[in-house]
Image (spheres, coloured by chain):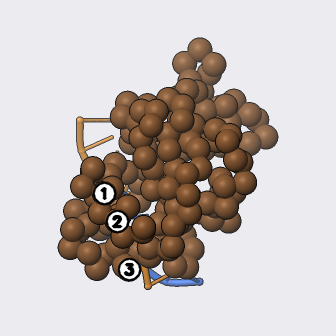
Chain colours: A brown, B blue, C orange
Amino acid sequence: MKSEPNVFSIDDLRNCPGQIEPWNGVRNYQARNFMKNDMKVGDGVLFYHSNCSPPGIVGCAVVAREAYPDESQFDKVSDYFDPKSTKETPRWFNVGVKFVRKTPLISLNELREHKELESMRVLQKGSRLSITPVTPEEWSYIQELSS
DNA sequence: GCCAACGTTGGC
DNA sequence: GCCAACGTTGGC
């Protein structure tokens, strides 16, 4: 899961100990569908800092609550407000995540150096999705890398 | 700040 | 349903 560190960083997540944080503000249907359809409680999350220098993986989290309507879509003063969404038929959903640990930075450059990771969705050319799936093999490999 | 890649909108 | 115009993401 990508996040811009000046908006919500791994430290911000760490500072909510024991708490479940809503991964809100996702306004892309593909990313929403990953949360809504595929992410289950207990699934591991790689926390990725994007739009910064250097971008890369900075920690791990875990899915702690399955997808439910994103409250920010109803909040008129929120940047994420969606006037077309209603409580009856909400358009946007988010999972809840919990902090697990920080890792030494694994930069985008470094990720690209590992042949084992070359098919990672997030590394594909033009990939802009803020949420992308990770295979069990990729997950294990990165856990090993960052241990 | 640039710009490639992708997503969304809306006229037709 | 097509597609031009526009908006966003995010690496560099």
Residue shown at 67% from the left, 42% from the top: A18
Mark toward the start of the polypeptide (3 vs 2): 3
Q: Residue at x 24, y 55 (%)?
A: A137
Provide the residue designation for mark 2: A144
Mark 1 vs mark 2: tell me if same chain.
Answer: yes
Q: Amino acid at mark 3?
A: Asn
* SS at circle 2: helix
Q: Secondary structure at mark 3?
A: helix
- Image side of residue B10 versus residue A20, left or right: left
Q: Is residue A18 visible?
A: yes
Q: Can you identify the residue that label 1 sits on?
A: A140
Q: A43 or C11, which lies in front?
A: A43
- What distance separates the C-alpha of mark 3 from that of mark 2? 18 Å
Find out whether the residues at labels 1 and 2 contact each other: C-beta distance under 8 Å.
yes
One can see residue A92 in this view: no
Three-letter amino acid code at the position of disc 2? Glu
A34 to A137, vertically: above or below:
above
What SS does tag 1 mark?
helix
